[in-house]
Image (cartoon, rainbow, N blue to C red):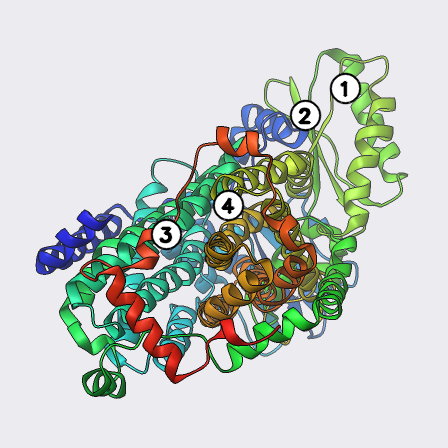
Amino acid sequence: MAALARWCVRHRLVTVLLWLIAFAGVTAGATVAGSAYSNHYDAPGTEAGRATQMLQHGFPGLGGDSDSVVWRSTGPGGVRSADVEQTMTHTLDRISTLPGIASVTNPYEGSHSAQISGDGRTAYATITFDQPSENIGKGQAKAVVDTAKAAESGGLKVELGGSAVALTQPKSGHVAEAVGVGVAAVVLFLAFGSLAASLLPIATALIGVGTAYSGIGLLGHAMTVADFAPMLGLLIGLGVGIDYALFIVTRHRKSLKRGISVEEAAVGAVSTTGRAVVFAGATVCIALLGMLILRLSFLNGVAFAACLTVLLTVAASVTLLPALLSFIGPRALSRRERRRLYEHGPEPEVPTGLAARWSAFVERHPKKLGALALAVMALLALPTLSLHLGTSDQGNDARSSTTRQAYDMLADGFGPGVNGPLTLVTHVNGAEDKLALDNLSGTLEATKGVASVTPVTYNSGGDTAYLTVVPQSSPQSQQTTDLVHRLRTEVLPRAEQGTTLDLSVGGVTAAYDDFAGVIVGKLPLFVGVVISLGCVLLLLAFRSFGIPLKAAAMNLAAVASAFGVVVAIFQWGWGSEFLGLGRAGPIEPFLPVIMVSVLFGLSMDYQVFLVSRMYEEWLETGDNRRAVRVGLAETSRVINSAAVIMISVFLAFVAAGDRVIAMFGIGLAVAVALDAFVLRTLLVPALMHLLGGANWWMPCWLNRRLPRICIEPPHCRATMPGQRIDADALVDELVKERQPDVRDIPG
């Protein structure tokens, strides 16, 4: 690490130019190639997946995206009035001639009269594109929207819904990122007092994350990558990138205050704190890649996209940042700090003031403070018990969006189930199968939870058939999930007796339920692997059983409490409409997996930063109380500053207006806040005080046999490059003479 940092410092202009060239090249490549994101919730071997395959094979024309044009008339005669019928028929004819449109079902023609509501006020047409939504351009979808909206008049309201239409919804641009970065810059300036030093972490993170953002666009051409992956990468990358740079700049500034030269200070910061940053980033990537054990292509793309972002932010922190630090020279310190260094000489920082008093306060009251922290975490985790995994639909969009209004108009006119019909598909062999299918409609209509059933449709060869079941409840409702289960386990098996039919229940709702079921089934394995990995790494780093076990418990507590807040806001609807995130709905099934991965890495970052200082003091003194007190006092300020930055970045993404990204933003912000301000600075030190020397216990025979992981070499803490140990000790002694150290505060 030292050799790499020294090269980057001595060739600082070349280093900066290489990063700028990489950023420009990847961005240009992504612009030329365009995006190729896909939101296929395909889970191998599921019943909904089989239904989709049979439908696409037997009915090739149904493979494109299907959207809806919904209109409502408040005038005399409703939607059946002559002027409304003429206007909408002309509009649908124009839409049918647009590029990429395969078919349009007009409720005024043929056998589609069921697409007019019973009160005659609402009607809808189904528009089928010739391609799936991920292959439909925004301009192509916008042409459909503009053509349909042109039919609106005083008494006629027209709205559109569907995946392709959603592409035309206005985005917030990069306002969220700008807000988060702005808040981070303010926090950094307050922490450093130097404008130059506060801008460097921002610049480093933006270059790394910007390169990764374009790289994710290119990655979408090689594998399945969800459309929210770039925003998720930005969210994670800005948070960890600014924090990693903060740690390195903080170490660099401390070295400058000790009188070390700019070059040696930058090299020393990378060779010490930079090693911890690489370790933390590698841990995040390993946790993210743990999603590969789920064997879901949808999550594989998200994992690789997030890993790419973390890797590039880490690379920028240990290469670009030292080069930039050498450019600004002593200006990494504020004017007052430079003046004091010139007048009084080297003065290493020692923890005094609030940090020292808080550390001593925790030592005096570990039981009470530990119980308070546990109560807070338990209270926030309670809503997690009612967690309902499912996939939100356009009924959760913002109230002002055309997709949400179309959804509501369909639900009002035809019932909520029309927004998420179920599709029953089967192969057909002979007359007995056809007779059974013809009789199935009556059985389905009598089934609890079914609103209506369409007639059976056969393909041209007569060997595949499907029929559509409209539930009485909305797609994301638990009642619809119960109906899917009832059809699969009770109704359809009885109907198949005596035939060769093998009916599969498909449709969007069934596919979402199957996807959630696969994730829930593998979630314990995934969490177990990720937590076990963390325990092994901490065991090797700190030679203790107690430290890894506490870390595992803290990670689970942070995740549970964060999910409690997410459930309260998004599932219970506490403030979701106020935040512009639509009405209440289920929690996305992939959210637990991704959040566990990310939070595991972020928690490891804070855990290593806190406990490594305690571990060093323990090795030097053998006094657990002193080790915990000193470690907390010396690291709490940096941990809190890093947490404030990360929380600000995460919360800023709520302004993006995207429900999925907002879930990640709020969930991660809450988890980081609890991890930094409740767990790491309160519960962890309180428990370590209560456990005493047991924190560091490990059998001697195991200690001798385990390999050692050195996150931050002790000799690097004792002396920085270019400074003798005896001179460093002399400076520390002089400082102790001027002001009391945390070591002198009784616990």
Which quadrant holds residue 118? bottom right
Residue with the mark numbered 1: 434
Give the secondary structure at mark 2.
strand
Q: Which residue is mark 2?
A: 465
The residue tagged with tag 3: helix, strand or loop? helix
Crowdedness near tag 2: few (<14), some (14–19) or many (≥20) residues, C-alpha within 10 Å: many
Labels 3 & 1 near each other (Cβ < 8 A): no
Disc 1: CA contacts within 10 A as few (<14), some (14-19) or many (>=20): some
Q: Residue at x 59, y 61 (%)?
A: 671
Which residue bears the numbered disc 4?
542
The amino acid beneath tag 2 is Ala
The residue tagged 3 is 714
Mark 3 touching mark 2, by CB under 8 A? no
246 or 255, nearer to the observer: 255
Residue type marked 4: Phe
Q: Sequence order check: which comes first, mark 3 or mark 1?
A: 1
User: What is the C-alpha distance between the residues marked 1 and 2?
Assistant: 9 Å
Q: Are marks 1 and 2 in contact (CB under 8 Å)?
A: yes
Q: Which quadrant of the structure image shows residue 339?
A: bottom left
How far apart marks 3 and 4 lie (CA) works out to 13 Å
Amino acid type of the residue that numbered disc 3 sits on in the rendered structure = Pro
Which comes sooner in the sequence, label 2 or label 4? 2
- Residue type at mark 1: give it: Lys
Q: Which mark is residue 481?
A: none
- Residue in the picture at 65% in, 38% down: 523
